[in-house]
Image (cartoon, rainbow, N blue to C red):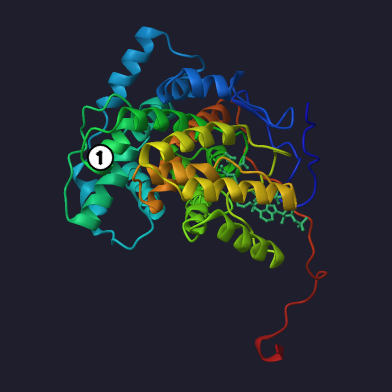
Amino acid sequence: MAEAKQLSGAGLRGQSAGETALCTVGQSGSGLTYRGYDIKALADQVEFEEVAYLLLYGKLPNVQELQDYKARLKSMRGLPAALKTVLEQIPANAHPMDVMRTGCSMLGNLETEADFGQQHQHIDRMLAVFPSIINYWYNFAHYGKRIETETDADSIGEHFLWTLHGKQPDPLHVKVMHASLILYAEHEFNASTFTARVCASTLSDIHSCITGAIGSLRGPLHGGANEAAMAMISQWQTPDEAEDAIMGMLARKDKIMGFGHAIYRDSDPRNAIIKAWSKQLSEQVGDTVLFPVSERVEAVMWREKKLFCNADFFHASAYHFMGIPTELFTPIFVCSRVSGWAAHVIEQRANNRIIRPSADYTGPDERPVPGLEDRD
Ligand SMILES: CCC(=O)SCCNC(=O)CCNC(=O)[C@H](O)C(C)(C)COP(=O)(O)OP(=O)(O)OC[C@H]1O[C@@H](n2cnc3c(N)ncnc32)[C@H](O)[C@@H]1OP(=O)(O)O
Ligand SMILES: O=C([O-])CC(=O)C(=O)O
């Protein structure tokens, strides 16, 4: 069994910043569990709504609970008129993660969390409405279409694809969305979740916690890596071309997006799962370029640097094969990770102390303030 990665140094690496009952990451080098359930079993056997319920309500739902939960989420997909108005003001060249951030924040103005007793209602609302927010804006900004966001879709993943493409999606794509949303749902004290917990620790409202988390997820070293990986692999027409380009990038010490991880040492357990779905989708669309290119990049990175694909890398091709525009990849991550973020906010609130670490000071010794005319 692989050992856990040796963690130390900058970026608070290896320092415990609190307790959680939600998730273990990399305890055996490459394991991942949500409330004790292995990620592979979850991705193989359940729907995303069951995982969201597990994270948020503490147990896997039974048949009745799942039915009720899905019905509740389905009833919460509509957008308030004032939110539509705001979304319609955002230009087509805005980054969709900025749209998510604004959409979440505006929702907090319209449906403010007045006290923490309402937290579950607001969290369920965000889970239900985030796909509506991004796809309402996307269709309006790019095609001038005001889409209907109250679809008959049975799940959040199906609702996302339906509102994006304006039609009931292929059942295979719905399955892939369940797996993808499950893989992205939760990951302990990663940067965006930690942002949410820091915000929660000040006793702020749930929309502020999630808005801040969206901002942290946006960066290419975190959730934005799936889009960056797509931009990279779509440049290459053959595996050989990809290999030459990767060798050049490594020689220049460029970062290869979708590779490496702050915690895992020799693999990310989510990679094999999303890679298998990407392969199946590649066969469905008759792809002969993107999947072979991706596999070659994976092989070269391992051969040259012992760096492995993280969850983002094969998400790029998988989403692409389902006709999802690249700039919507990270917003899908938001539609999933909001479940983990919110579960952490609930956990933080239940046993709170304001998060306020210290810093090692590296500035000048104490000194007098010079008068304005005495300064350089
Ligand atoms: C699924 C959601 C996620 O957020 S997963 C992460 C998504 N981000 C990416 O894919 C961006 C590319 N990867 C990276 O920037 C890093 O691997 C991240 C994920 C930030 C982890 O950083 P950190 O913990 O500092 O890495 P490390 O200590 O293991 O680095 C060891 C040495 O390897 C290098 N390295 C790491 N990743 C890459 C990479 N993708 N491409 C090229 N080189 C990489 C590091 O620079 C470091 O090198 P050195 O020892 O400083 O010379
Ligand atoms: O855990 C991390 O550092 C990054 C993350 O959110 C993930 O891999 O899902």
153 left or right, relative to 304 = left
Foreground pick, 131 / 303: 303
Say which quadrant the C terminus sits in: bottom right
Taking the spot 27% from the left edge, 33% from the top edge, the residue there is: 169
Task: Mark 1 and ligand 1: say if the CB distance to the nearest ligand atom is below 8 Å.
Answer: no
Residue 164 visible here: yes
Say which quadrant the N terminus sits in: top right
Taking the spot 33% from the left edge, 47% from the top edge, the residue there is: 103
Q: Residue 340, percent across and down?
A: 51, 32
Question: Most extreme residue toward the right, as rendered?
Answer: 365
Whether 33 is drawn above or below 200: the answer is: above
Foreground pick, 205 / 186: 186
Residue 358 visible here: no
120 left or right, relative to 266 = left
Q: How many marks?
A: 1
Whether 185 is drawn above or below 256: the answer is: above
Q: Quadrant of ligand 2?
A: top right
Q: Residues within 10 Å of mark 1 (few under 14, many from 20)?
A: many
Whether 359 is drawn above or below 18: the answer is: below
Q: Residue 102, percent across and down?
A: 36, 51
Badge 1 element = helix
Task: Residue under label 1, please give it.
Answer: 163
Foreground pick, 118 / 241: 241
Whether 362 is drawn above or below 190: the answer is: below
| Residue type highlighted by circle 1 | Thr
Q: Residue 52, percent across and down?
A: 45, 25
Q: Residue 190, percent across and down?
A: 61, 41
